[in-house]
Image: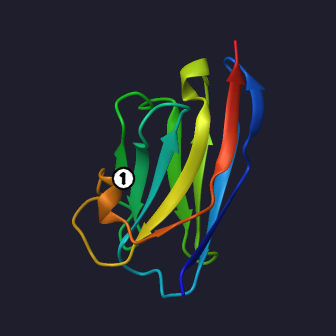
C-alpha cells in the first residue's frame, strides 16, 4: 500500500524559503508521477508542481515558476519542493500525491492521482 509522508512545512516571513519533502513507500517508483498540491482556506486544491518518477519531466503552475523547484531522489523514493521568495498567497496546506500509472507529463488535475499524503502547513506572514 502506497504511503506518502510530507514534512518541512512551517511559518516563514515574506521572501523566505522552505523545503518540503515527500517520502514515498509501498511500490516501485520507477513510473508514474508525484505531484505537489496546495489548498488555502476557502479555496480549492490547486496544482503546484509535478515530476515523473521515470525521467524527471517537470511541470509547474505559472504562479510558482521561477520560485519553486521540484526534484526527486529515486534512491530514497523522496520528492522535494524547494520554495523561495515566498509570498503570503503561498500560504496553505501542501499535499503530495502519487499517480501510479505511466503518463507523458505530470498531470495537473488532482483526479489523476491515486494516493495522497496527510499534508503539511505552510504559512507565509506579511
Residue 111 in view (yes/no):
yes
The residue lying at 54 percent from left, 33 percent from top is 40
For the N terminus, the image quarter is bottom right
Judged from the image, the secondary structure of the residue bearing numbered disc 1 is strand
Is residue 75 or residue 86 the one in the foreground?
A: 86
* Residue furthest right as drawn: 11
Residue 106 in view (yes/no):
no
The residue lying at 36 percent from left, 37 percent from top is 61
For the C terminus, the image quarter is top right
Location of residue 48 in the rendering, given as x and y in whole percent from the top left corner: 44, 42
* Residue furthest front as drawn: 42
Q: Which quadrant would residue 62 be assigned to in this image? A: top left
* Residue furthest left as drawn: 104
Location of residue 47 in the rendering, given as x and y in whole percent from the top left corner: 39, 44
* Residue furthest top as drawn: 126
Q: Which quadrant would residue 122 be assigned to in this image? A: top right
The residue lying at 37 percent from left, 74 percent from top is 54
The residue lying at 60 percent from left, 43 percent from top is 93
Residue 64 in the image: above or below residue 121? above
Disc count in the image? Answer: 1
Q: Which quadrant would residue 74 be assigned to in this image? A: bottom right
Location of residue 4 in the rendering, given as x and y in whole percent from the top left corner: 60, 70
Is residue 7 or residue 115 the one in the foreground?
A: 115
Q: Badge 1, how many Cα within 10 Å: few under 14, some, many 20+?
A: some
* Residue under numbered circle 1: 58
Colour setup of the view: rainbow
Amino acid at each position: 500500500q502506497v504511503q506518502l509522508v510530507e514534512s518541512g512545512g512551517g511559518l516563514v516571513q515574506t521572501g523566505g524559503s522552505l523545503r518540503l519533502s515527500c517520502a514515498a513507500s509501498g511500490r516501485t517508483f520507477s513510473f508514474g508521477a508525484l505531484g505537489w498540491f496546495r489548498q488555502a482556506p476557502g479555496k480549492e486544491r490547486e496544482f503546484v508542481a509535478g515530476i515523473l518518477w521515470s525521467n524527471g519531466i517537470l511541470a509547474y503552475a505559472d504562479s510558482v515558476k521561477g520560485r519553486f523547484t521540484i526534484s526527486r531522489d529515486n534512491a530514497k523514493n523522496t520528492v522535494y519542493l524547494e520554495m523561495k521568495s515566498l509570498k503570503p498567497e503561498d500560504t496553505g496546506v501542501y499535499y503530495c500525491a502519487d499517480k501510479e500509472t505511466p503518463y507523458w507529463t505530470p498531470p495537473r488535475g488532482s483526479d489523476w492521482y491515486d494516493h495522497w499524503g496527510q499534508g503539511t502547513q505552510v504559512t507565509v506572514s506579511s
